[in-house]
Structures are given as C-alpha cells and as structure tokens.
Amino acid sequence: MERIDIDTADRAFVATRRNPRENHASFFVMGLMLAAILVPFLFTIDLDSFEGRVVIVAPWALMFVLLLLSWRRARRHRHVTTAISAAWDHAQLEDWAAVEAILPHLVRHPIRSDADRGRTMVLLASLAERKRSYDAAAHIYERLLRERIGDAPLLQQAQLALASAKLRNEELTDAVDLLDRLQQIQMPASLRAVYEVIRLHQQVFMGHYADAIANIDDRIALFRRHLSTRAGFAYALVAAAFHRLNMPDRARRYWNDATMLVTPNKILERFEIARDVSQAYPAAEHPL
Amino acid sequence: MTQNEASRLIRTLRRQILFASVWKVGILALIVVASVGAASAWTTPEQSKMLWALSVASAGVWILFVILGLRQTREANQAAVYIATGRLDLAEQQLRTAALAFNLHRRGKLLACHNLAVVAHGRREYETAAALSAGVIELGQGALRGVSRICRILLADCMLELHNPEAARRAIEPIPLGDPGVPLSEQLLLLPIRLRCDAALDAYDHILIDLPNKVRRAELLDSPKAAMCHQILADACDRSGRRSEADFLRKRAELYHDSAPADARKELASDADD
C-alpha cells in the first residue's frame, strides 16, 4: 500500500461493503431441504424404492451442504475478525509496518459486521495520516460519519479525528467550525480530553497562544487523568504555546514532561509544529 | 451472592453440563440410527416412514436447543451492558437465570457464570468471584480459551485482594505475557496483576525480564494503572542497582498519577481494576 488517496479509500469502501446476496445460497439450500423433508409426508412414496431412498438421503445431504456453507462463512468471518484485532493491536503498539501488511488483504473483501468494517476503515484512515495523506483520511472519516458505519463510540472518535485531519490538511475554516460544533456536544471525559488536544493544536497552529494557555491547569489535569502516555503530545503543544509567548521556563518544563512520556521523534512525527521547541530545550533522557 | 451460593452454582453447572453431554450424544445417536434405519432395506415402508419422522423430529429438537443456547448467550452478553452501567442487581438476576437454564452447549452457561464473577468482583466480593472464576476455568477445559484466560486474570486479581499471591501466580502462570497469541487487550489486563504478584512475592528479578516490552505495554494502560506499573518496575530497577532506569520510571509514574505510598498502591490497583 504505497500511497493512500481518495480513490484508494473509495475502492476500500466499495470492496468491504457487505454482499447483500451472501446468504442467498444458504436460503436456497434450506428451501430445498425443507421441501425434501415434506415430500414423504405430502406424497405417497414407497420409501423402499430407489426414489424413496433418495428422498430419505436428500435432506441430510442438503443439511451437510448447508453446514459446509455456514462453516465456510463463519471461518471467513473469524479470520477477518482476528486480522482486524491483530491490526488494531499493532496500531496501538505503533507497529505501522505490521498494520500495512495486514490492511490491504482486509480492504479487498466484504466485511459482514458494520462495527468491524468501521474499525477497518479507521485503521486505513490512521495509516493515511501516517503517510500524511490527510485529505484521504478526512474523506474516510467523512464517509464513516455520513454512512454511519461503526458503533457509537467509534463514530464519536471519527468526528474528533475528522477535525484533526482537516486541521492538518489546512482546511482551517472547516476544522474550526467542526471543533465549535463538537464543543457543544456532550461526550465522555476521555473523549473530551482528546477534543482539548485537537483544540490546543488548532490554537497553536493558528497563533492563538494566549487562548492555548488560558485555563491551562484544568486542561493539564484533564490530559493527565485521561490521556495516560498520550498526554505527552498535549504537553508538547503546551510547551510550544509557552515558547512562542516567550515564557521559556514553563516551555522547558512542559517539553521535559512531554519527552519523558513520548520520544521527541514521535512528537515531531505527529506535531511538526513543535520542531522549534525541540531545538530550544533539552529532551528528557530515555535510559530504556 | 455468597461464596457458598457460588460453589453451589458451580456444582449445579457441572451436573447440568454432564447431563447436556448425555442429551447431545443421545439426540445425535437417535438422528443417525433413525435415518440409517429408515434408509435400510430391512425395515417395512411403515417403519421407514416412522423412523424418518423420528429422525426429522430429533433434528428439530436439536435445532430448537441450538436456538435456545444462542438466546442464552445473547442474554449473557446483554447483562454486560447492565454491568457497564453499574446496574449490578439487574445483571446478577439475568445472569443467574441464564446460567441455570437448560442448554445443550456450555458456552452460554459459562459466559453467564464469567459475567457473574465480574459482578461479584465489582462488588468486592472476592471469595465469590474467585469461586466462580475457578469454576469457569475448570468447566471450560480449553473450549473457551478467551473466556478462560480472562477468568484466570480475574481469579489472580481476587487472590491478590485476598492476600494470596502464590495462588494468584498459579492462576496466571499458563498465560504468557507478550505472547502474540494473547490479544493485546488481555495482555494489558494481565500486566498490572503479574507485576503486583511478583512484587508481593519479592520476585523482583522476574519483574525485570523483558523490561522494555513491559514498559511499552504499561504505556498503553490508563493513568492510574500505568503509574502503578511504572512504580513497581522502578522499585525492581532500584533493587537491582539500575538507578538511572529507576529514576526515569519513577518520574514517569509521577507524571501519570499522583504518587501513592507503597501501602496504598495495592488499593489503587484494585480501584483501577474496577
């Protein structure tokens, strides 16, 4: 998967769509089986004759075919679910090479469950973001939201990810509009913390440094409580805001906290905006 | 639910699962014998027809039980929603019914029993949760690997709360940390418990095995658990003279969560598990 663009994403949406005719073969065999069961009761057939033996054997043979079809479908479903879980685990461990190895196979075939399909497309969008194809990532999130693919928590995450992708793609008006709308929506505290990171990114990106550090203590408490290690990214943005406001002591402190949790390389991979901070202050040492 | 009630429930389940196995074999044998009999040349046409009807009826009964079993599995899963929303009484009531209802397949019963253990754990009834978890592990017998693994982790946590780290370690010994066959979500449940176990048994050398991977996984935990794991890893580094790593891990622990004194750490971990 060299490049992920909007066409790649659209092809993935089409290929992973559930086949509406996938159960037709099973229904046909089931109908034949029911008919074969009813034949001896509806018609007078000599069960001792050759035809009679066929009538006795037919339902069992059809049931075998039905079980075979169900087993094949269940095996395929299990295989897909396992692959999605594995890719999701690799993504959490930031092993993107492994995600990239799994994903192309997943997005070529129909996925039965909407939740699994949503998770797969979110993985594709995350990979697109890694490759800096922010327009493709935003397109995927938009389609997920428009077509309501996935469960409610996934869709809420997709809304936040869409705002972030638009911001990175420099669609600033859309990003700010979306963030303003999301501010009015009730969401769990863990998602609110993610929202605040994106808002902070937008404020630093657009030069609203004073807004970025307003209520900073409340924000830091929220990040610390809900973002665990990912709070490092938020601290880096806070450091960037203080640095640009010419408050080097606090910038140094937050940069140290940020790099204590996340390595500078990872921070800069995600937030290029923090590059001048990384050059101005020493990062924490990672002895592990 | 008390510990005695839990033990009684497990005994009942053991009996029911045995009974269901006999039923399963019986129905399958009836289907095969009746079909073969109906198709054989030694039976009269009337007998053939009767045997044919018997085999079809047996298959119908089998299908009916499968549908009932699926319904029970769904009920067991629905109760998880009650657990998540803190309505433990409703969850317990629904799960008891699901666990005791007749079912040809043990999956639904054991899932219900596992969820009952989660309810008991949520109420800090650790003896009850331990009895139920041990029962699921015993009755699962490898057929429900995922559920059995989670029950082992739950059992270990209960044993730690009951100040029995040896039993906790025995419970989780068969689950290798970092094994690619174990999903990451289960590894993340296992890590804090394994570290607490090793710390309680003073097995600090054991804690330091594969340290970078343990730190990598600890980073994925929520803040209180990540802090606790970092603190235990820091203590282990300290004891083996790895001062720079210990300082680094301790500073990180402070960044994750307000530092907890060593005595309160177990309490914190238990809260985080809930």
Image (cartoon, coloured by chain):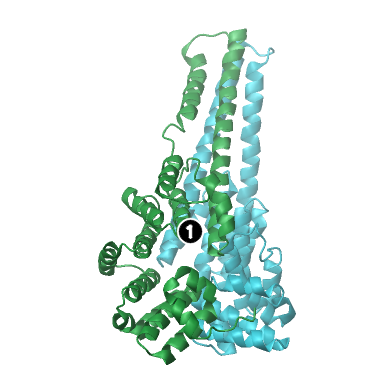
* Residue under the image location 60 percent in, 23 percent down: A61
* Residue under the image location 57 percent in, 65 percent down: A93
Chain appearing in green on the rendered image: A
Chain appearing in cyan on the rendered image: B
Residue B15: x and y in percent read 63, 51
The answer to whether residue A96 is left or right of residue B79 is right
The answer to whether residue B69 is left or right of residue A50 is left
The residue indicated by pointer 1 is A131
Which chain is disc 1 placed on?
A
Front-most of residues B182 and B217: B217
Tell me if residue B94 comes above or below residue B53 in the rendering: below
Label 1 element class: loop
Residue B18: x and y in percent read 65, 47
* The image quarter in which residue B230 lies: bottom right
* Residue under the image location 70 percent in, 78 percent down: B208
Which kind of residue does numbered mark 1 sit on?
Answer: Lys
Front-most of residues A265 and A52: A265
Looking at the image, can residue B103 be seen? Answer: no
Crowd rating for badge 1 (residues with CA inside 10 Å; few <14, some 14–19, many 20+) = few
The answer to whether residue A55 is left or right of residue A210 is right
Front-most of residues B150 and A153: A153
Tell me if residue A216 comes above or below residue B129 in the rendering: below
